[in-house]
Amino acid sequence: MINTAPDILVVFDCDGTLVDSAHNVIACMRSAFERAGLSAPEDNLIRRSIGLNPDVAVRHLAQAPLSDAQLEQVVTGYKQAFFQRRLQADHHEPLFDGVREVLEHLARRNIAMAVATGKSMRGVNAVIEQHGLDGYFGSLQTPDHNPGKPHPQMLEKAMMAAGALPERTFMIGDTSFDMLLSKNAGCRGIGVTWGYHDEAELLESGAERLIGRFDELLEIVDAA
């Protein structure tokens, strides 16, 4: 028997959409630059780069062009700092309000879900373990095996894994990178206003609609 495609696929960004990780990202990125002997970027610039692959974010944040060796040193330092931070007893990346309830509701309706994020696979798995989210997502698309946002491959692979069509796929994210990813893949971008880019940027980069509460997503899915 040939499996039919799921009616709807909902793909979530992680940092700034599902979890609030800005404080950890800022601390680890500043540490990585300083350990490489470079000036640390401003906190707000780091916050705005969340969602990009680490190597893209580092080049974007550097105040001068970096050599390949410097780039590797900062990226490696960032990943190591984040790994060490997760081992600390007080490490926490809290879920935003309403996330768990919405995931449970979508799961009860057998709606396919996935993640597309600039976070590493190790980082995504840590979030899933910390919050008990195992089983919700059919695929996890990360920089480990994909080009960074806004390249469409993450969404293309998520759709392929779920057997979903672009016009029935929603990309839920908090940055212009997410909305451009959705646009490039021919999907429907839904911007969340509690994350790291402002409303105007989300709309200008292709958001079909903005939501200010996570449960508003259910209305959009129900109307699809």
Image (cartoon, rainbow, N blue to C red):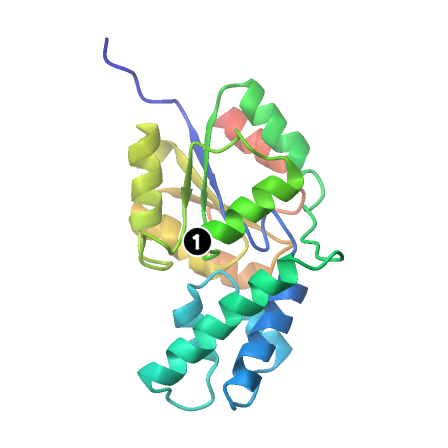
Q: Which residue is at a point 39% across and 22% down the rendered structure image?
A: 7
Q: Which residue is at a point 64% across and 72% down the rendered structure image?
A: 27
Which of the 4 image quadrants contains residue 150? bottom left
Q: In which quadrant is the N terminus drawn?
A: top left
The type of residue carrying mark 1 is Met
Which of the 4 image quadrants contains residue 103? top right
- Give the crowd class for mark 1: few <14, some 14-19, many >=20 residues within 10 Å: many
Instruction: Answer with left or right where residue 133 lies relative to residue 137.
Output: right
Instruction: Answer with left or right where residue 62 lies relative to residue 184.
Output: right
Residue 141, position in %: x, y?
39, 46
Q: Which residue is at a point 64% across and 64% down the rendered structure image?
A: 24
Which of the 4 image quadrants contains residue 155? top left
Q: Nearer the viewer, residue 59 or 208?
A: 59
Judge whether 53 appears above or below 158 on screen.
below
Q: Secondary structure at mark 1?
A: helix
Instruction: Answer with left or right where residue 59 lies relative to residue 134.
Output: left
User: Where is mark 1, residue-wise?
Assistant: 179
Residue 95, position in %: x, y?
67, 46
Q: Nearer the viewer, residue 207 or 146?
A: 146
Judge whether 94 appears above or below 68 on screen.
above
Residue projecting furthest to the right: 90
Q: Which residue is at a point 59% across and 71% down the rendered structure image?
A: 28
Residue 178, position in %: x, y?
45, 54
- Residue 197 in sight from this viewpoint: no
- Residue 104 in sight from this viewpoint: yes
